[in-house]
Amino acid sequence: MADIPVVYTLTICPACDHLRDTWAKQGIQYDERRVDQSQDTLDEALLYGDNVPIIVYPDGKVEVGFEGHKG
């Protein structure tokens, strides 16, 4: 598994925008995968949850939503 989080997002999503803005300001690197641009990516994301953003940390921990917000 990669050493940075994988984040499943939508192109237009207030919670996803909040995550992108917050993590950019904090300098946090991540692998963003937009579920609305690939069926394979959507299928991957659905293994973890049905709301975005979905954050999959390198240790396997999964967080659905960001700071209390879901898209």
Image (tube, rainbow, N blue to C red):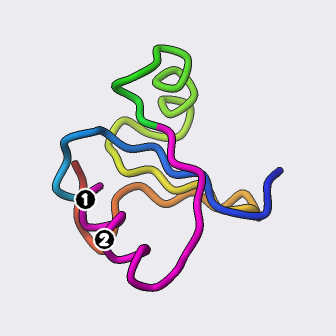
Q: Position of residue 12 (x, y in %)?
A: 19, 41
The residue drawn where x is 46% and y is 19% is: 38
- The disc at residue 53 is none
Q: Position of residue 46 (x, y in %)?
A: 48, 29
Q: Is residue 34 left or right of residue 58?
A: left
The residue drawn where x is 57% and y is 28% is: 44
Query: Residue 15, relative to residue 71: is it above or below?
Result: below
For this orientation, the residue located farthest to the top is 39
Residue 49 falls in image quadrant: top left
Say which amino acid is labelled 1. Answer: Asp
Label 1 belongs to which residue?
17
The magenta region covers 16-33
* Mark 2 burial class by Cα count in 10 Å: few <14, some 14-19, many 20+: few
Query: Residue 33, relative to residue 60: is it above or below?
Result: above
Q: What kind of secondary structure does the magenta stretch mostly adopt?
A: helix
Query: Residue 71, relative to residue 29: is it above or below?
Result: above
Is residue 44 part of the magenta span, yes or no? no
Q: In the image shown, does 9 or 60 lie closer to the viewer?
A: 9
The residue drawn where x is 34% and y is 59% is: 65
Q: Is residue 38 left or right of residue 53?
A: right
Q: Are marks 2 and 1 in contact (CB under 8 Å)?
A: yes
Residue 56 falls in image quadrant: bottom right
Q: In the image shown, does 4 or 66 lie closer to the viewer?
A: 4
Q: Position of residue 58 (x, y in %)?
A: 74, 61
Q: Is residue 9 left or right of residue 6?
A: left
The residue drawn where x is 59% and y is 68% is: 29
Say which amino acid is labelled 2. Answer: Asp
Is residue 24 part of the magenta span, yes or no? yes
Q: Spatial distance from mark 2 to mark 1, Cα to Cα?
A: 6 Å
Q: Position of residue 23 (x, y in %)?
A: 43, 74
Label 2 belongs to which residue?
21
